[in-house]
Amino acid sequence: MTVLDLTHSCDMQFVAEVARESGQNLTLCYQCGNCTAGCPFTFAYDLPASSVMRALQWGQREAVLSCRSIWICATCKTCSTRCPNNIDVARIMEVLRQISRREGYAPEKQIKQFQDSFLQSVMRHGRVFELGTMMSFIARSRRLTDMDLGPKALARGKLFLRARDIRGRDEVERIFRRYRESLEK
């Protein structure tokens, strides 16, 4: 687990940027720890959710945007539902991922490669096409160690050989287009 050094200078513009993009009042967090206590992924985090929130309040741009935790977060919203001040911590984690991507902080290449593959699949089909996502990730990462999982998942009916597009794919494409346009502003 990473220890935060709060003696570094505060980047209050960063705090304001995250507050604006997430629509959350970051000053409401008083470090109760409910977000960390409820998170199913705390064991894998380098900074627990409450520490991400504290570092964020202190404007620790580098520490927050380079931590692995924001990329491991599954956005299950357990943290958000447990927050006594109704802070949508999961939304903040998503905004932090977006800013981290924009500014080139993605800490682990494979995490970013998987997210790129996942989002590409959703954009193309309106939902995740697991086999396509897996093949795209393998092509991007050149990681062949998980190849043995494919036949097992196929045998159990967990992978489909063809993508099943949803109705309203054009609406999903509009969502992605709006997101890309917001990045250009």
Image (tube, helix red, strand yellow):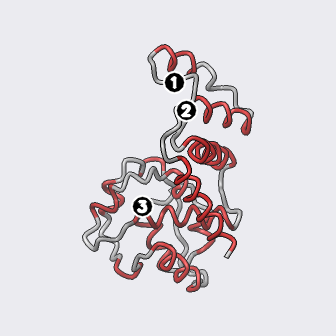
Q: Does label 1 or label 3 sit earlier along the sequence?
A: 3
Disc 2 secondary structure class: helix
Report the front residue among 146 and 140. 140
Quarter of the image with the C terminus in it: bottom right
- In the image, 171: left or right of 137? left
* Mark whose residue sits in front, 3 or 2: 2
Q: Residues within 10 Å of mark 2 (few under 14, many from 20)?
A: some
- In the image, 1: left or right of 113? left
Task: Look at label 2 and name its amino acid.
Answer: Glu
Where in the figure is residue 171, as x and y percent of width and height?
Answer: 52, 54
Residue at point 31% right, 54% down? 38
Q: Which residue is mark 2?
A: 130
Q: Classify residue 35 by image quadrant.
A: bottom left
Task: Look at label 3 and name its amino acid.
Answer: Ala
User: How far apart, in angstroms, are the residues tagged by discs 3 and 2?
Assistant: 24 Å
Q: Are marks 1 and 2 in contact (CB under 8 Å)?
A: yes
Task: Look at label 1 and name its amino acid.
Answer: Leu
User: How far apart, in angstroms, are the residues tagged by discs 1 and 3?
Assistant: 28 Å
Q: Residue furthest left?
A: 84
Report the front residue among 38 and 129. 129
Disc 1 secondary structure class: loop
Q: Which residue is mark 3?
A: 90
Q: Residues within 10 Å of mark 1 (few under 14, many from 20)?
A: some
Residue at point 52% right, 80% down? 15
Q: Does label 3 or label 2 sit earlier along the sequence?
A: 3
Residue at point 52% right, 32% down? 164
Please say if 48 is above or below 103: above
Q: Classify residue 144 by image quadrant.
A: top right
Mark drawn on residue 159:
1
Please say if 15 is above or below 181: below
Where in the figure is residue 184, as x and y percent of width and height?
Answer: 69, 71
